[in-house]
Image (cartoon, rainbow, N blue to C red):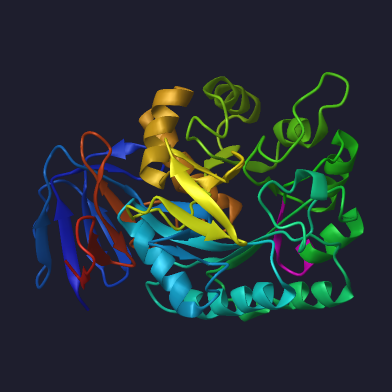
Amino acid sequence: MAETLLTGARVFTGSHMVAADILLRADRVAALLPPGSPLPEGAALRRLSDGMLLAPGFIDTQVNGGGGILFNDQATVQAALSIARAHRRFGTTALLPTFITDTVEGMRAAGRAAAVASAMPGSGVVGVHLEGPFLAPERRGVHSLAHVRPIDAADLDFLTGLPARFGADARVLLSLAPDRVEPAVVARLVAAGLIVAGAHSAATYAQTMAAVEAGLSGFTHLFNAMPPLANREPGIAGAALAARDTVCGIIADGVHVHPAMLRLALAAKGPGGLMLVTDAMPPTGTAAESFTLHGQMIHRRDGRLVTDDGTLAGADIDMAQAVRNAVALMGVGLEEALRMASLYPARFLRLDDRLGRIRAGYQADLVLLDADLQVAGTWVAGQWWDATANEGEAGT
């Protein structure tokens, strides 16, 4: 079984910085060894610069597209794999391809495709995120009004059966509006194995907390597609901040959420309560200046993705930039920013027994960062991917 010893870089394990060498065996972390440990017999040695940092690979729970591909346009196995591949150069080693509000047939195809992709070793696909269509029409944002609808019996049959299509290492995340889906339905979805998050909603504080009591455990792109906080009616955003056992995804691009609100959310939720997401679209990893979504032209302008009328349509950010922004805009230390990109999403997905840390027995998903937190490359299930190249080379 192929082994590689990584030596020379600092190591962030997911909990703290250590001086260590990392022994990889096939797709797993075999051991953390004292620096300068003898090379195990038969193992390859890879020397890394002492200015580099090895950290757990980033985990992104909201990825609409990348590399020129929109999952809604191509809800196929190959599209899911290609999107995951496009995000590796930005440090993302695991993600949920995200299918936003669309046709019933499209939603079902997306679920089936992601299930197949997630079963492929080293794919980087760890489930699927269905964002909609059970949303509040008045808070739909760029989601298609023609496809926003109430949940029905056929939807429930499909959704409650979907987690069984995925293996133990993958998850189904459903974003819905708590004012459009009854708590009893939320409870049924959670009991079936789905992770349920609140999103695109005009729900009151009471409605949202009732959904939390029923098992809703997260919130999608906090503050966006939600009414603003108010003193007499905190609404869904206030409930998201107050609900201690929930995790909020947040887009730290300085556009979707003002830096002051980023810091406010961090203060309210505390460590582990916020995870970084990109809400990435097809331009990620490309030089494209536009793409189409539901027949609308979306423009890439000044760090924004917008429709002709200026409505935000996803985000023009990658996970490495989100980590850098967490440090610069939110004022968190590097270690906490890295947890927000790896350990906390792993916990939210209930995959933190195998992802989100550099620890013996965990999957060998690592990101190699330089002194400026730019990505030099990643290991996905032990396979090296150079950030400047398109091809990975196993065991190096």
Q: Is residue 37 magenta?
A: no
Q: Residue at x 40, y 51 (%)?
A: 357
Q: Which quadrant, please, contains the C terminus?
A: bottom left
Q: Residue at x 68, y 47 (%)?
A: 218
Location of residue 205 in the rendering, given as x and y in whole percent from the top left corner: 85, 34
Q: Residue at x 66, y 38 (%)?
A: 224
**Residue 111 appearing in the image:** yes
- For this view, does 21 lie left or right of residue 200? left
Extreme-front residue of the structure: 308
**Quadrant in the rendering for residue 325:** top left
Q: Residue at x 23, y 64 (%)?
A: 384
Task: Please name whichever residue, 384 or 104, is drawn nearer the observer in this view of the structure.
Answer: 104
Location of residue 233 in the rendering, given as x and y in whole percent from the top left corner: 87, 26
Task: Please name whichever residue, 44 or 385, is drawn nearer the observer in this view of the structure.
Answer: 385
Q: Is residue 193 magenta?
A: yes
**Quadrant in the rendering for residue 86:** bottom left
- For this view, does 291 lie left or right of residue 188? left
Location of residue 37 in the rendering, given as x and y in whole percent from the top left corner: 12, 52
Q: Is residue 319 above or below residue 188?
A: above
Q: Is residue 242 above or below residue 197?
A: above
| Span colored in magenta | 190-197
- For this view, does 381 lie left or right of residue 348? left
Q: Which quadrant, please, contains the N terminus?
A: bottom left
**Residue 163 appearing in the image:** no
Q: How many marks?
A: 0
Location of residue 257 in the rendering, given as x and y in whole percent from the top left corner: 57, 30
